[in-house]
Structure formats: structure tokens, C-alpha cells
């Protein structure tokens, strides 16, 4: 356990009282989760994807593109830090955790692939996230899910089904 993180189950209030950190710390049903540090490849792909989405968001206001670590409350007792997320209608930056479910959430697979593929997929679907992209930098693919269901595996270009006009060419991500 990382110094300063509680062991055992905690309340949301106890979780939110933890000191500010650049670590990606999440709360899932009372359990504090500390995902492993991302790899250099993860961060490279994430940075390129963030630039593409942020540019799109700037051209389509009001849109907020969030980048981890930033707390998002999916429901009481479920606070996550998605790698990336998009909220149409913008966000004023006044409160954290963000108390609104994003339309699009994106995770770049890390060492704990099952956490992103299974746990996060279920959490996002239960919360009502319209679309979830699972980015596999090793396979150069993006799996698109609507709710819990996979609806596509993209290798060249991913087009959002939840956010009209949002499309990202994938080739620049893999270079």
C-alpha cells in the first residue's frame, strides 16, 4: 500500500479528504484503487490522443476534454480518473470531483488490462456513459463500446457514435 492511503474500505468523504496527489487514485464501492504507473508508450499515445480531442473540442464549443488525473463521480462511492473523457456542454472547472457522467470515456490499456477491459467497462456502462473507447497501443486498435456492448474494432479511424462530428485518425497515435 502506498504511504498515506487507507487500507480497508473507506467512505467517499474519507476518500475525498485524502491529500491532493498526481497519482491516479480511484474509489470503487469503498475500495481505494491505485492503478500501476503508465508506461512511456501509454503516455505517448495518450498525449497524442488528448491533443487530437482537445483540438476538436476547441473547434466545437462548448466541449470539455478531461485528462487524468481528474476525479469524475460516476455515482456515490464511485470516483474514477479516466485517461480521457469528453463532455459536451463544457464544464466550468468549479468543482471536483466532477459530478456529471461524460458522454465519451477513453482508457489506454495499461499493465492491468482486465481492469480497463472489464471493471471500468462495467462501471462506465452502469453510470450511463454513452461510449467507451479502449485503446490498445500494442495492437494499434481502438475497441468502441456502447454501454457494455462492443460495437467496433477500429484500426484506421474511429468515429464517435455518441458525439456527432467527432472522428480521430489513428495512424498518428501509433508512430
Image (cartoon, rainbow, N blue to C red):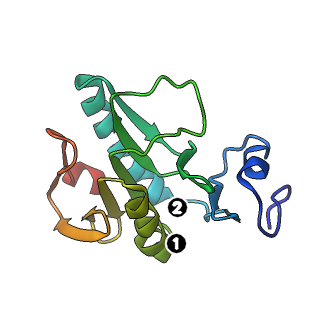
Residue 169 in view, yes or no: yes
Q: Which residue is mark 2?
A: 39
Q: Is residue 155 left or right of residue 33?
A: left
Going 17% across and 51% down the picture, which residue do you hit? 161
Q: CA distance from mark 2 to mark 1?
A: 8 Å
Image coordinates of residue 16 in percent, x first then y, are 73, 45
Q: Is residue 100 above or below residue 121?
A: above
Q: Is residue 174 above or below residue 54?
A: below
Q: State which quarter of the image contains the N terminus.
A: bottom right
Q: Which residue is mark 1?
A: 111
Q: Is residue 27 left or right of residue 170?
A: right
* Element on which disc 2 rests: loop
What is the tally of numbered marks visible in this picture?
Answer: 2
Image coordinates of residue 102 in percent, x first then y, are 39, 44
- Mark 2 / mark 1, whichever is N-terminal: 2
In which image quadrant can residue 96 be found? top right
Amino acid at each position: 500500500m502506498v504511504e498515506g492511503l487507507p487500507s480497508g474500505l473507506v467512505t467517499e468523504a474519507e476518500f475525498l479528504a485524502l491529500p491532493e496527489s498526481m497519482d491516479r487514485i480511484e474509489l470503487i464501492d469503498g475500495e481505494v484503487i491505485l492503478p500501476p504507473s503508465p508506461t512511456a508508450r501509454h503516455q505517448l499515445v495518450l498525449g497524442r490522443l488528448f491533443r487530437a480531442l482537445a483540438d476538436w473540442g476547441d473547434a466545437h464549443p462548448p466541449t470539455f476534454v478531461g485528462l487524468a488525473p481528474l476525479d469524475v463521480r460516476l455515482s456515490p462511492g464511485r470516483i474514477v480518473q479516466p485517461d480521457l473523457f469528453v463532455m459536451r456542454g463544457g464544464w466550468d472547472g468549479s468543482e471536483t470531483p466532477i459530478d456529471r457522467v461524460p458522454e465519451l470515456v477513453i482508457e489506454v490499456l495499461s499493465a492491468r488490462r482486465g481492469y480497463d477491459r472489464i471493471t471500468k467497462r462495467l462501471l462506465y456502462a452502469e453510470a450511463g456513459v454513452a461510449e467507451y473507447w479502449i485503446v490498445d497501443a500494442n495492437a494499434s486498435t481502438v475497441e468502441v463500446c456502447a454501454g457494455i456492448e462492443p460495437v467496433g474494432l477500429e484500426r484506421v479511424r474511429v468515429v464517435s457514435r455518441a458525439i456527432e462530428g467527432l472522428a480521430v485518425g489513428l495512424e498518428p497515435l501509433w508512430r
